[in-house]
Image (cartoon, grey):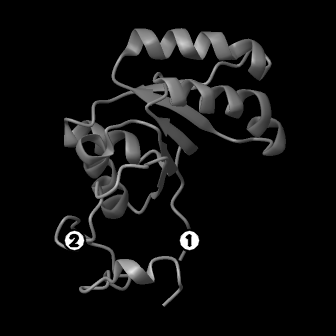
Amino acid sequence: MKPMHRAYDIILWGSTGFTGQLVARYFAEVLRLRVPGLRWALVGRDAAKLSQLSASLAPLCDSCAPDILVASAATQSEVDRVVEQARIVLSTAGPFARIGQPVVDACVRLGTHYVDINGEPGSFAPNPNMITNTSPSPSPDPNPDPNQAGTGR
């Protein structure tokens, strides 16, 4: 199967928060040099804050400011519109129990990889009914065992 072309390799969801800004700076200073041609964008709710952050990163990116994408996790159509443009969503936006699920759901439905910095116990409880998986790949384990996480079972 040929991979679908996406406008961005990685989008940084929650870019204007404290941690999001640190990650964005790391992308600008380090990651873009280690991964030449990396296509990335900043994502958040506030266009003015995103524009300001993008402009502040431009000097670190050879005067090529990262793109911005405006979306709120409260509106699924906005989440879908942004998620479908990326191969990977890196989320630093929280609280994950409230904000994370619409983004995770969109990633599953649209075939986009997802990673976050979540440290909130129970925010993504193992519940196969929480996500509608429409892909032809194997479905999630209907009886996940949290004690087996990461064991490759």
The image's mark for residue 127 is 2
Which residue is pictured at 55% across the width and 14% down the height?
Answer: 53
Q: Is residue 111 above or below residue 146?
A: above
The image's mark for residue 125 is none
Q: Give the quadrant of residue 46.
A: top left
- State the SS at label 1: loop
Q: Position of residue 136 (x, y in %)?
A: 34, 81
Residue found farthest to the bottom: 153
Relative placement, left or right, of 67 versus 112 is right
Q: Which residue is mark 1?
A: 2
Q: Residues within 10 Å of mark 1 (few under 14, many from 20)?
A: few
Mark 2 residue type: Asn
Which residue is pictured at 47% across the width and 17% down the height?
Answer: 50
Q: Position of residue 110 (x, y in %)?
A: 36, 59
Q: Which mark is in front, 2 or 1?
A: 2
Q: Residues within 10 Å of mark 2 (few under 14, many from 20)?
A: few
Question: Earlier along the polypeptide chain: callout 2 or callout 1?
Answer: 1
Relative placement, left or right, of 62 versus 82 is right
